[in-house]
Image: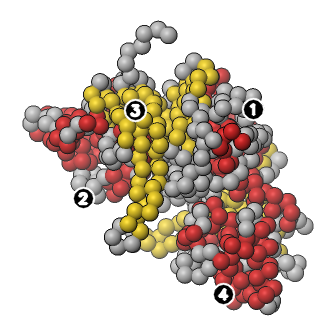
Amino acid sequence: MGNDVLIEVDDVSVTFPSRQGLIRAVRNVSFEIKRGEIVALVGESGSGKSTTGLAMMRLMPTAGISGAIRLVRKDGKPADLLKLNEAEVRGVRGNDVAMIFQEPMSSLDPVFTIGTQMCEAARVHQRISRREAYVASVKALDAVGLPDPEQVMLAFQHKLSGGMRQRVMIAMALASHPSLLIADEPTTALDVTIQAQIVDHLKMLQRQTGMAILFITHNLGLVAEIADRAIVMYAGEIVESGSVRELFRRPRMPYTAGLLNSLPRLGRKKDLGAPIEPIPGSLPSPLAMPDGCKFHPRCRHFTPGLCDSGPPTLETCEDAHQVRCARWRDLARAAS
Amino acid sequence: MTAEPPPLLKVEGLRKWFDITRGVFGRKVGQVKAVDDVSFFVRSHEVLGLAGESGSGKTTIGRSVLRLIEPTAGKVTFDNVEVTSLGAREMRQFRRRMQIVFQDPLAALNPQMTIEEILSEPLTVQGLARNAAGRRDRVVELLDSVALSADYLTRRPSDMSGGQRQRVVIARALSVNPEFIVADEPVSALDVSIQAQIIALLVELKTRLGLSMLFISHDLAAMEYISDRIAVLYLGRIMEIGPSTEVCGNYKHPYTEMLISAAPQPDPDRKRRIIPVGEIPSAASPPSGCVFRTRCAYALPECASVVPPLRNVGADHYTSCIRDDVVSGKALA
C-alpha cells in the first residue's frame, strides 16, 4: 500500500442467496482511495455500486463477502475490515468511516428530537458529558450550514425539509471526524437547487477536514462536479476508472462513452445539432448474466467470438486510466 | 404579428387551492396555493415543457388540464371546447383526445393483467375495435410503435424492465389516438441509459404522429431537448416562458438562472456561477409580490409589493422579473 492510501478494496466479491440461486452482486472489485481524495463510484441499478459501499461499512449481514478491505485507522495501524469482529467494526464505523444515505427520513428516528439523536451518537463514539455533547452537536449543525441550529436540535425530523434532514445526517456522520465518508446517492431525493447547496457544502467540508469521500451516484453531472477520480461499474464489475477529466474527455469503455452520448446537454441544443444516442437494450438480470463482456449485448462495437467468449480483464490504457474492453486498443486508434 | 391558428390547448387564469384542515370536523385553517393564476397555451404539434422543483405546481397543472383534479378557478380550452365546463360523461368521451403518461410505470399498470389485456382495455372502453381480431392487430401495432415485439403480448408488468413498462404505458396512452399527451416526469424513475431511449421514443412519436405534449420534468436538459417551448414555474406561478433554446441559453429570470446554474452538467471544466440560497417557502404562506424574491440575489424593495405580470422580452419570450439589468443568460459559460 502506498503512503497516502487510506483504504484499499482488494478483490472484493459479494454474493447473496436468493430463491432462484446465488446472486453475484459485486465481482472482484479492487480500488483504493487516497487521503483527502473524492472518488465517485458511478453506475446504474444493479451495477453493485451501493453494495460495494455497504460492504465497506460491513453493513451486509446476509451476504457472503470475500477479498480484503484494508483501512489505515486513525492511530496509523492498518486493519482488514472483513476480518474484524462486530465490536471492532462498530469502532471503525463512526470513528474512521461514516456513511450517509439517499433517504434521510428513514435514517432518523421519528420519536426522538434531532438533538437527542445527535447527542446519543456523539456519546457512543466519544467519552464526553451531556453538556459537551450538546455543544458539539450545535457546532456540527452549524458547520453543515443549518440556520438556527439550536432550534433544529429541538425539532423532530418531520418538521424539517428533505435538504435539512440530509444536512443533519451529514452533521451526525462528521461529528467524530471520520477519515472517509461514504455518501450513497445523498442528493438524489432532493431538488436541484438543494442538491447544489449540499454538494457545495460537502466539498467545503472536505477541504476543511481533509477527509476522503466515496461518492456513490448514477448522475454523471454530479461526478463531473464533485469528484477527482471516478470508477464506473456495470453489472457488478468495474468497467472503467480514471481521473474525471480523462474519463469525460476520452472514455475508453463503450458503456461509459454510451452513457455520455445519451445525456442531453443543457444550453447546447443549437450548436450540438446531433441527436442524443441512447444505449439500446436493458440492464442484464443478475440471474442471467451474459458470457464474456457483460455489456456486449448492448454494445455497438460488439465483435462475435471476441466479446462474448472470455471475460475481458481490466487493463491500464493510460496512466491511472483503466478499462475493461477487449477492443479498447483498436477503438482508441479509430477515435484518434 | 402574423395571424396564427388558435392554439390547441389554452389555459387561462388557472388556480388550484387546496384547503388545509385541522381536527375531526375538518375545520379549514388555511389554503395551499398550489397553482395561482397560471395562463399558457400549447400549439398544435408543439411540446411545451413545464419546469420547476417540487412544490412548483407543475404536476397539479398537468392534472388540472385533464381534469383529473378539479381546478379552483380558471378556464381550460382544448380545440375550442371548454374542457372545464364539460359534464362527467362528455369528459370521458373527451379523454380520448387527451391522455397522460405517469412517472412510475409499475404503479400505473395492473400487475394481474397481461400486456395484451392492458392495451386492449382502452380500445374496448372507447369502442375503438370492432372484433377480437381487429383488437389484437391494433395491440400488436401499438407495441410495434413503442419498439416492443409481439412476444410481449402474454407477459405481465412484473416480467419486464422499467423501460419496457414505460413503453407499455406510452402505448396505452396512444391506443385511443390522442392528439395531446401530458407526460408527467416520464423518465425520472428510469435508469440513465434507459432515460435516453424513452426521450428519443417520445421525440419520434411526436414527429410521426403529430402529437402535442405537455412535458413535465425537473430535468432541464432533457426538457430542452424535447420541448419547443419551456415554462419555468415557481410556487405555483410562471416565472418565465419562451422558446426552449431561449429559456435555457438566453434566460431572463433570476430563478431560471438559479435552476440552470444548479443543474449538474457532465462537464468537469464547468464552474457554477451562482450558488442557490435558501429553500422553497411553503405554498400555504407564499411571499407577497414576486414569490421568488426571498431567494433572489437581485431583489429590490418593490419586488415585495406587486405581483409582477409576465412581460415580453423577445419573440414568444416572457419573464415575470421586473429587472432587466441583472440576468445575463450565461450561467453555463
Identified at 41% across, 68% down, the residue is: B22
Residues at marks 4 and 1, CA–CA distance in whole angstroms:
58 Å
Name the kind of residue labelled 4 in the image.
Glu
Q: Chain of mark 1?
A: B
Question: Where, by quadrant of the figure, is residue A98 drawn?
Answer: bottom right
Q: Residue at x 29, y 37 (%)?
A: B84
Report if residue A33 is visible in the image: yes
Q: Name the foreground residue: B296 vs A97.
A: B296
Marks 2 and 3, the one that precedes in the sequence? 3
Q: Badge 1 is on which residue?
A: B326
Q: Position of residue A100 (x, y in %)?
A: 66, 68
Give the residue at mark 4: A86
**Pointers 1 and 3 in contact (CB under 8 A)?**
no
Going by the image, does A194 lie left or right of B126? right
- Report the side of B237 relative to A120 (left or right): left
Q: Chain of mark 3?
A: B
* Dot 3: element: strand
The residue positioned farthest toward the right in the image shown: A3
Q: Which mark is residue B112?
A: 2
B186 w.r.t. B322: above or below: below
* SS for callout 2: loop
Q: Which x, y percent locates residue A235?
A: 55, 56
Disc 3 marks which residue?
Answer: B11
Expressed as whole percent of the image width and height from the top left, the position of residue B80 reads 29, 24
The chain letter for the residue carrying disc 2 is B
Residue type beneath disc 1: Val
Front label number (2 vs 1): 1
Q: CA distance from mark 2 to mark 1?
A: 56 Å
Q: Quadrant of the C terminus of chain B?
A: top right
